[in-house]
């Protein structure tokens, strides 16, 4: 930790002295509490994820510069304090942001919670996503943001990792179908990676915190439902909350295409790793999503 502090102290003169507790860990990053109401996010240069840490850092920095600090009755985002890059070493860059309250929802407890508890949370999340699209889209339009579609980007990166011809064919089919839907529009500015680990819940009386903006960009609204298919009834509650807030129902086929893209990316990243049952589960999820999207 002292080595990281030495690298950063010239770029951030008021950086608090360590220790900085690790409060979050993801595929690309670790997040440290600086103890002064801000957090430090360090982006790894390379992981088993798709793409590179340099690109991940750049996209998130651009998104936070555009959207940081956004807050509505249903949603709040951290504000960007400062950001920078490393010329060498294991990390590609860093982001310093304001700290949001709350904790990531526990997937096991939430999915199997009583229906009224699960549905209330899902509808809150749907309203938060609706607010994100409504508030972020005009900001991105005014700034002429060029941040692109996370579905097309992640599927294109995934193709280099597939070992089975069937996966290449499936990715091509999903890409073509998604491009056709995007051509119909309307496009909105999406978060691109909405899953429970990227949410912070401080209680039902508070707005949901949304973090991790490396996949943010222009896409169909349904791109933000890509992770939710596996959560069953919770997914339905999110869609209800979104429809109630926007007055527009979520397009089920577009959501299925987004879920199929997500399943393909999971296969590309994790392959046959883990217990054989996990590989079977991933394959089953992919087949289910392709069938739901009409791409058997």
Image (spheres, grey):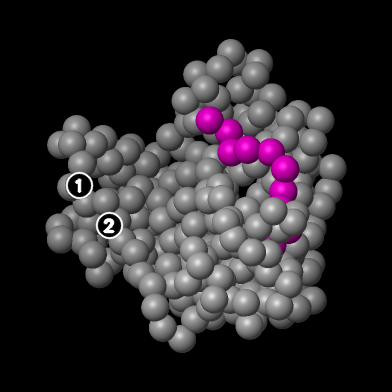
Determine whether the residue tagged by mark 2 lies in a helix, strand or loop.
Answer: helix
Relative to residue 163, is residue 57 depicted above or below? below
Q: Which mark is residue 273?
A: 1
Could you give the CA–CA distance between mark 1 and mark 2, rounded to whole angstroms? 11 Å
Residue 274 horizontal/vertical position (percent): 20, 41
Q: Residue at x 43, y 68 (%)?
A: 44
Q: Residue furthest bottom?
A: 87
Image quadrant occupied by the C terminus: top left
Crowding around mark 1 (Cα neighbors within 10 Å: few <14, some 14 to 19, many 20+) is few
The residue carrying mark 2 is 268
Q: Cβ–Cβ below 8 Å for labels 1 and 2?
A: no
Closer to viewer: mark 1 or mark 2? 1
Count of number-bearing discs: 2
Residue 146 vs residue 8, the one in the foreground: 8
Crowding around mark 2 (Cα neighbors within 10 Å: few <14, some 14 to 19, many 20+) is many
> For residue 82, which quarter of the picture?
bottom right
Give, as a single range, the part of the protein colored magenta: 97-106
């Amino acid at each position: 930790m002292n080595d990281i502090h030495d690298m950063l102290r010239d770029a951030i003169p008021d950086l608090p002295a360590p220790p900085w507790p690790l409060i979050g860990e993801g595929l690309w990053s670790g997040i440290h509490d600086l103890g002064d109401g801000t957090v430090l996010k360090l982006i790894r240069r390379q992981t088993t994820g798709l793409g590179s840490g340099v690109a991940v850092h750049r996209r998130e920095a651009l998104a936070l510069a555009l959207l940081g600090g956004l807050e509505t009755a249903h949603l709040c985002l951290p504000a960007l304090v400062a950001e920078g890059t490393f010329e060498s070493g294991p990390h590609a860059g860093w982001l310093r942001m304001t700290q949001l309250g709350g904790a990531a929802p526990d997937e096991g407890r939430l999915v199997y919670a009583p229906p009224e508890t699960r549905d209330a949370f899902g509808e809150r999340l749907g309203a938060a996503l609706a607010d994100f699209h409504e508030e972020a889209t005009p900001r991105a339009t005014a700034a002429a943001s060029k941040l692109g579609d996370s579905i097309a980007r992640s599927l294109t990166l995934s193709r280099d990792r597939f070992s089975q011809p069937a996966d290449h064919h499936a990715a091509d089919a999903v890409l073509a179908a998604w491009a056709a839907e995007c051509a119909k529009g309307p496009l909105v500015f999406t978060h691109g990676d909405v899953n429970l680990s990227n949410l912070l819940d401080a209680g039902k009386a508070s707005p949901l915190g949304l973090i991790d903006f490396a996949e943010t960009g222009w896409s169909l609204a349904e791109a933000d439902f890509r992770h939710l298919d596996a959560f069953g009834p919770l997914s339905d509650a999110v869609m209800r909350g979104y429809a109630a807030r926007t007055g527009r129902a979520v397009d089920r086929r577009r959501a299925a295409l987004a879920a199929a893209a997500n399943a393909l990316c999971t296969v590309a990243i994790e392959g046959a790793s883990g217990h054989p049952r996990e590989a079977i589960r991933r394959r089953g999820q992919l087949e289910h999503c392709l069938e739901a999207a009409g791409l058997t």
